[in-house]
Image (cartoon, rainbow, N blue to C red):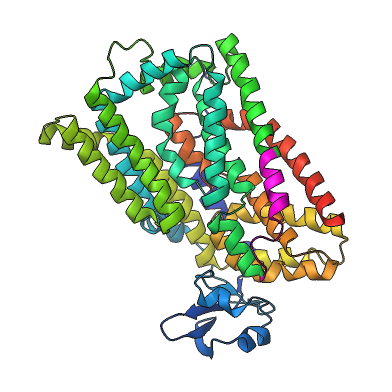
Amino acid sequence: MKKRKFPTAQTILLIIAALVAIMTFIIPAGKFDTLAYNSTENTFIRTSSNNETVLPATQETLNELNIKIPLEKFTSGAIYKAVNIPGTYKKLDAKPQGLVALILSPVKGIIDAADIIFLVLVIGGLIGIMNLTGAFEAGIAWLAKALKGREFILIIAVTFLIALGGTTFGLAEETIAFYPILIPIFLAAKYDAMVALASIYIGSSIGTMCATTNPFSTIIASNASGINWTSGITGRILFFVLGTIICVSYILNYAKRVKKDPSKSIIFSQKEAIEKHFGNITHSNLKLNFRLRLILFIFIMCFVIMVYGVSIKGWWFTKMTAVFLVGAILIGFTGRNKEAQFVDTFVKGAGELLGVALIIGIARGITVLMNDGLISDTMLYYASNMTNGMNKGVFINAMLYIYGGLSFFIPSSSGMAVLTMPIMSPLADGVGIGREAVVNAYNYGMGLFAFINPTGLILASLAVVKVGYDKWLKFVIPLVLMLLAFTMIGLTISVYI
């Protein structure tokens, strides 16, 4: 009897989209009023159902609406999205999303996620050009020889550096660019692709989970809670250090087993196919001449400029995409590629990541379904009511699970922050703990679930690496359980000291 295959990432997401569409028939529709700051007119705009009211941008307005956020958080641009107004939830006429809405959702999601999709496609084109020049081949062969006997350094360095990017400036979607580059290096070091995937994805996940200065999570969540983002930072730094040590140790333990006996690999059945796809170039005869070194320098500088732009200049996907596009052109010139050859290779390289781009779009379509069905705020409303009458320890752990659950429906960290913090953070006042504890629960809940969240980045990442979701779950679930126990103990202690 033929063994049944686990569904592809696209199929998993379409099944989830269908389930969400069904939920819009069951879960009551409802919405909070929202408040947005208009910097041009220096006013607030309150949106209720389909009505808009212009209000003076004063602290008195915020106090009257029971929004415990300083005015300067809005006027400085720290909060740039509309926030939910506490106590304004209203049930609305149901807007069930039927078959037509379900069919349209992936299309709407692709349009809505066009910025990150174009980034992924351009990165694919850049990788194609790099492979054409032979710079990867020569560089990886050189690195494999340089690290011989000390390959574990690669795991520690990659995981820690990406985790550092995650905790400081929210390195997440951008890591998709690293898979085609780093997987051949890990394969050359006699590890499997799962080790490369884990080092990159787990590094990013633990970093964003224990975010310290991440403007897209900790800072915006703290602002939306009405507290300074430095509140609770000592605990978050400690969590980051210990959490990263746990993750690196877990990956090293698995990598050691695989290196000693390749048959212990969770993806051993895919070994030949993955090596063929990414190129088995350990024994390359290409030498790192001046031109290839210059090409690698240009390539590395693309990422240096991207990190600088995102962390210092506040760049978003449009400018990041432009950096990689210019980098591809410069590399093409340096490699003396003919114009027709350059275009053909770039298009083929982009095509290699088209499946990843579609996954991102389909995942975004699920969010579109929930927003159009008006069920996101309903789940937030009932989740906030669940914590009434709890003691400190139970409350903070309940918040951890609530945020983990909500992140399935709202995978965006900044979106989650502005939608939930004005509602959730005041609940901390009622149980006698600081609001930074709710910010931490938000970070840890979203971050923990991100390790396996199918509506987040994991399915897109797995599509690049050619690894099934079932294989990933088998690998990562023990780590998630360890981190969950660690987090629950840490959160409980934090609210009692």
Residue farthest to the front?
Answer: 290
Left or right: 44 in relation to 112: right
- Residue 271 or 209: which is nearer the viewer? 209
The answer, for residue 137, to whether it is visible in the render is yes
Which residue shows up at 67% across the image and 68% down it?
A: 227
The answer, for residue 375, to whether it is visible in the render is no
Quadrant of image for the N terminus: top right
Q: Residue 156's x, y, as percent?
A: 57, 28
Quadrant of image for the C terminus: bottom right
Q: Is residue 12 above or below residue 115?
A: above
Which residue shows up at 49% across the image and 14% down it?
A: 190
Residue 22 picture quarter: bottom right
Q: Is residue 256 above or below residue 43?
A: above
- Residue 373 or 246: which is nearer the viewer? 246
- Residue 249 or 401: which is nearer the viewer? 249
Q: Residue 489's x, y, as percent?
A: 81, 44
Q: Is residue 68 above or below residue 309?
A: below
Q: Residue 143's x, y, as percent?
A: 41, 19
Which residue shows up at 33% across the image and 42% down it?
A: 302
Question: Is residue 230 part of the magenta span, yes or no?
Answer: yes
Magenta residues, as a range?
Answer: 226-241
Q: How many marks?
A: 0
Residue 290 picture quarter: top left
Which residue shows up at 31% across the image and 35% down it?
A: 299
Q: Residue 222's x, y, as percent?
A: 64, 64
Residue 385 picture quarter: bottom right
Question: Is residue 409 part of the magenta span, yes or no?
Answer: no
